[in-house]
Amino acid sequence: MREYLLTLCITAAVTYLLTGPVRKFAIVAGAMPEIRARDVHREPTPRLGGIAMFFGLCAGLLVADHLTNLNGVFSQSNEPRALLSGAALIWLIGVLDDKFEIDALIKLGGQMIAAGVMVMQGLTILWLPIPGFGSVALTQWQGTLLTVALVVITINAVNFVDGLDGLAAGMVCIASAAFFLYAYRVWVSYGIEAAAPATLFSAILMGMCLGFLPHNMHPARIFMGDSGSMLIGLVLAAGAISITGQVDPDALKLFAGSEKAAVHQTVPVYIPLLLPLTIIAIPAADLVLAIVRRTWRGQSPFAADRGHLHHRLLEIGHSHSRAVLIMYFWSALIAFGALAYSVNSASMWIVLGVVILSAIGLLLLLLPRFTPRAPMWAQAFVPPRYRRRGKAVAESAPVAEPVSAEAEEEERTPVAVGVSGVNGATAIGARSRFLDRRKAESSR
């Protein structure tokens, strides 16, 4: 565990320290595209944050290769090299897209090629544990198609959810933390060495996200862009593929007794089939809804719009930060709920806890729909929106100073969602500076 923590810290430190220089490079290189209709931020913000994340990945793999216990992962398996090859390819495609806006079909082809590169080097699904049947071996073509499909779905799901400051990095970090705990348990508790690569990938992925988040939280100073979102999506998929297709379920020695008891006892074996889906449940749901919505309107599935889940949270009335925290909450609930169920599937306390937390999550979702009023004795301790507008409150309120007509007009002007200073991300100052500079230059 100490070596995993050291690898995580080195990855996070390298990513964090490189993000600042990468931001300056992105500004100089002109990787600051114009504001699109679907964007939430209102100021040009540099991309290419995936450059720092990729070098963090390389640093994590390099450090792990020189550690005593983790060195065996590289000597006994080719999966780390397969991951690095696929990550380098998908990262290059993302960098080109952040700078030159590559066509969506070309990116899809690049994702499939990156997945194929990993398959050629041994990172593929070899068998599937099916309830009631045990392990079902897959042919080479079946394993390849299933691996490529899982990689492409995960990459695009993470890419689709990357719409708010800190959203994608935080959700993937939560997912990788849950996956790390599961993979570490399979390796240590059951003594299965084949689970070590997935554990390493999850620790490195957590370091990449944690190192980038301080620069990407609202208001973001830099975006990860497709070079970052596709990279972390591929690493997440690689860990799921490693522990699903490479770990022999029979090695867990849970198949005993009747068929019903065997199916019940082998829940931890089937979790690898579900956990990759649960950790990206919200991004995957957003992906499916986006495809259905766009095709129903007669548009291309790759056409951009403002109908994603995070856009809907902003439309409901949530602030930028609260929308991100709500998405974090649901991601953690689904991922860690599945993890807890894999540890003890017979406990009703786990189910009860998930139900209670789900009710709390629904309450948070509907919070802007109603504004409950606090009792009179609590008026001084709650925000103004929850205070009663009664006569007593009006009498106790201080007398306001006279307001000019211009100030009153500004107060009445509604602020749209996404305006800089409210939900937007400012990268290099307020927009008014650019406007004043243009006026000054034109007057000369």
Image (tube, helix red, strand yellow):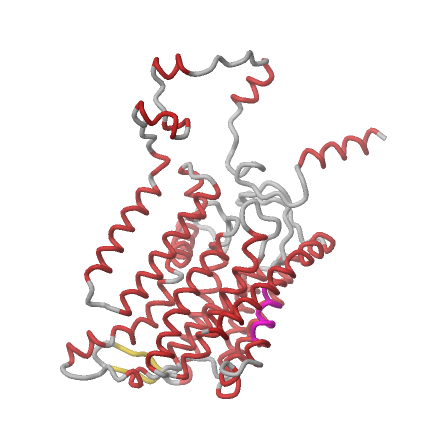
Q: Position of residue 64 (x, y in %)?
A: 55, 77
Q: Is residue 444 left or right of residue 158?
A: right
- Above or below: residue 24 compared with residue 205: above
Q: Position of residue 240 (x, y in %)?
A: 41, 72
Q: Position of residue 207 (x, y in %)?
A: 52, 65
Q: Quadrant of residue 312?
A: top left
> Residue 62 versus residue 133: which sits nearer the camera?
62
> Residue 170 versus residue 142: which sits nearer the camera?
170
> Residue 190 versus residue 286: which sits nearer the camera?
190
Q: Residue 56: within the magenta?
A: yes
Q: Is residue 135 left or right of residue 183?
A: left
Q: Quadrant of residue 136?
A: bottom left
Q: Quadrant of residue 368?
A: top left
Point out the image quarter for the N terminus: bottom left
Q: Which residue lies at the image location 27% right of the left edge and 65% below the top edge?
A: 341
**Residue 88 seen in the figure:** no
Q: Position of residue 369 (x, y in %)?
A: 34, 34
